[in-house]
Image (cartoon, grey):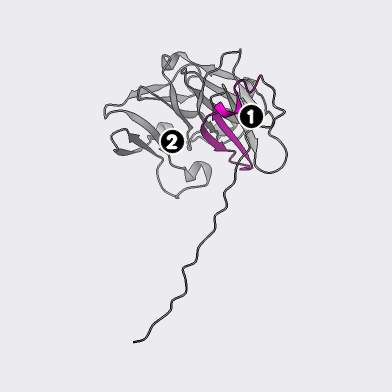
Amino acid sequence: MSIILQPPPRHHHISTQFLQLFHSSCSSRLLPYSVSSIRTYDVQFLPSDPNHFYTATNLGCVLHGVRYGGKGTPRAFRNVGDSIVDVKTVDLSPFSGQFLLAGCSDGSLRLYSTHRELPILMWSAFTRSSEITCVRWSRSRPHVFYVLTSTSVLHIWDLQKCDSAPVASHKSSQGKLIAFGLSNDHVSLGIGLPGRQAEMVLTFANGSVENHIINEQLSICQPDEVTSFINYLYSCL
């Protein structure tokens, strides 16, 4: 009987990194709760520089952290006034990392410049106080973003057409809609699969998943649209 000894399988070591959200020198105005009560709900990395990350928290603000060296400036993106509501979801524009969307538990939506701690635009009436559970910028058109509320309503915004209300709102008829995701658009961003149409994936509480093709009105970026988007938001500063 012969025994064949095989080499042991290779194990890949994956390092775990802990990201520090704030420093002890942060003011109590930005950190109204004890450290032990801080909760985080969502995190996004700056597309142009993944060293910077932005975290949705229960502190009423979005915290700005840096993985290596230095400190994020501003350290926190807060609300106008003293009201404290959970920030549930955040997303950075893939066309310009200078702008950040934040959705809150009271149904308010804030748009920030990453260089200022106060929002440059705010909306709330369109959700009727329903909690915002997910917000995502379009990967096809810079003016477009999508907002999902706890009532399973998906709101579609197009700032080029209207900056005061969604251009469309769709109530799910397939049960409770809990999340959605967007594919990268190779034509607009240069990443993703060439020739693939822009897509949205919907996930439901019953475990079902739907894949949808996004129509051309929301997915075809005009040649000057990125410039007009940035100029519009700079005019709001």
Q: Residue at x 43, y 42 (%)?
A: 183
Residue 219 disc label: 2
Q: Residue at x 37, y 86 (%)?
A: 2
Q: Are marks 2 and 1 in contact (CB under 8 Å)?
A: no
Counting from the top left corner in percent of width and height, residue 82 is at: 60, 13
Q: Relative to residue 49, is residue 102 drawn left or right?
A: left
Q: Secondary structure at mark 2?
A: helix
Q: Residue at x 57, y 52 (%)?
A: 15
Counting from the top left corner in percent of width and height, residue 149 is at: 40, 23
Q: Relative to residue 168, is residue 137 drawn left or right?
A: right
Q: Residue at x 70, y 30 (%)?
A: 24
Residue 176 seen in the current view: yes
Q: Quadrant of residue 74?
A: top right
The residue indicated by pointer 1 is 114
Q: Residues within 10 Å of mark 2 (few under 14, many from 20)?
A: many
In the image, residue 31 lies in the stretch drawn in magenta: yes
Q: Secondary structure at mark 1?
A: loop
Look at label 1 and name its amino acid: Thr
Which range is magenta? 29-57
Q: Relative to residue 58, is residue 126 drawn left or right?
A: left
Q: Relative to residue 177, is residue 80 drawn left or right?
A: right
Counting from the top left corner in percent of width and height, residue 32 is at: 61, 20
